[in-house]
């Protein structure tokens, strides 16, 4: 069972920055895809950013130019650097990891970390 533990959330003022971390219990080089999703109250969970095993990243249009996803393979950790935060970014942020299996990739999730952007 792969375990993901997020940290780094909190309360920040508009325009501020936060860095989220996601520590994985297994070698992240096994993961075909890792990423971050978020879910705001009353809304569906949405993709924020993803990064492949080869290092290719993609972003939701709403965060392009403000958020950066990265990975440290030696630490089995994926990061989400969030700059120029806006109240619309307020949500619970979840880390995910896709593990290849004989039946196709299986997705694992962390427990989430709350990000609140407010003055």
Image (cartoon, helix red, strand yellow):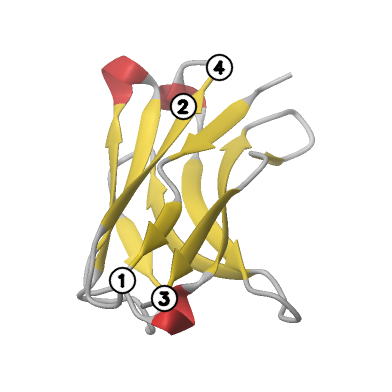
User: Are the two marked residues, 4 and 3, in contact with CB atoms closer than 8 angstroms?
Assistant: no
Of labels 4 and 3, earlier in sequence is 4
Of labels 3 and 2, earlier in sequence is 2
Under circle 1, the secondary element is loop
Spatial CA distance of label 4 from label 3 is 33 Å
Could you say where residue 30 lies in the image, as x and y percent from the top left? 49, 24
Which is in the foreground here, disc 4 or disc 3? 3
Could you say where residue 3 lies in the image, as x and y percent from the top left? 64, 24
Which is in the foreground here, disc 4 or disc 1? 1
* Viewer-closest of 36 and 89: 89
Q: Quickly name the residue at label 4.
A: 25
Judged left or right of residue 43, residue 90 is left
Residue in the picture at 50% in, 72% down: 90
Under circle 3, the secondary element is loop
Q: Quickly name the residue at label 3.
A: 118
* Viewer-closest of 52 and 103: 52
Judged left or right of residue 12, residue 88 is right
Spatial CA distance of label 2 from label 4 is 7 Å
Residue in the picture at 35% in, 80% down: 86
Q: Quickly name the residue at label 1.
A: 13
Judged left or right of residue 12, residue 17 is left
User: Are the two marked residues, 2 and 4, in contact with CB atoms closer than 8 angstroms?
Assistant: yes
Under circle 2, the secondary element is strand
Of labels 4 and 1, earlier in sequence is 1
Residue 23 got which mark? 2
User: Are the two marked residues, 3 and 1, in contact with CB atoms closer than 8 angstroms?
Assistant: yes
Spatial CA distance of label 2 from label 1 is 26 Å
How many neighbours does mark 4 have within 10 angstroms: few (below 14), some (14-19), or many (20 or more)? Answer: some
């Amino acid at each position: 069972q792969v375990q993901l533990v997020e940290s780094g959330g909190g309360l920040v003022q508009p325009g501020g920055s936060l860095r989220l971390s996601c520590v994985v219990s297994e070698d992240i080089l096994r993961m075909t895809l890792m990423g971050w999703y978020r879910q705001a109250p009353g809304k569906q969970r949405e993709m924020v950013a993803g990064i492949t095993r080869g290092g290719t990243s993609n972003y939701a249009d709403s965060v392009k130019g403000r958020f950066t996803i990265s990975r440290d393979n030696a630490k089995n950790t994926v990061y989400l650097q969030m700059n120029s935060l806006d109240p619309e970014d307020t949500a619970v942020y979840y880390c995910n990891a896709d593990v290849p299996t004989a039946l196709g990739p299986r997705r694992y999730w962390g427990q989430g970390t709350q990000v609140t952007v407010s003055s």
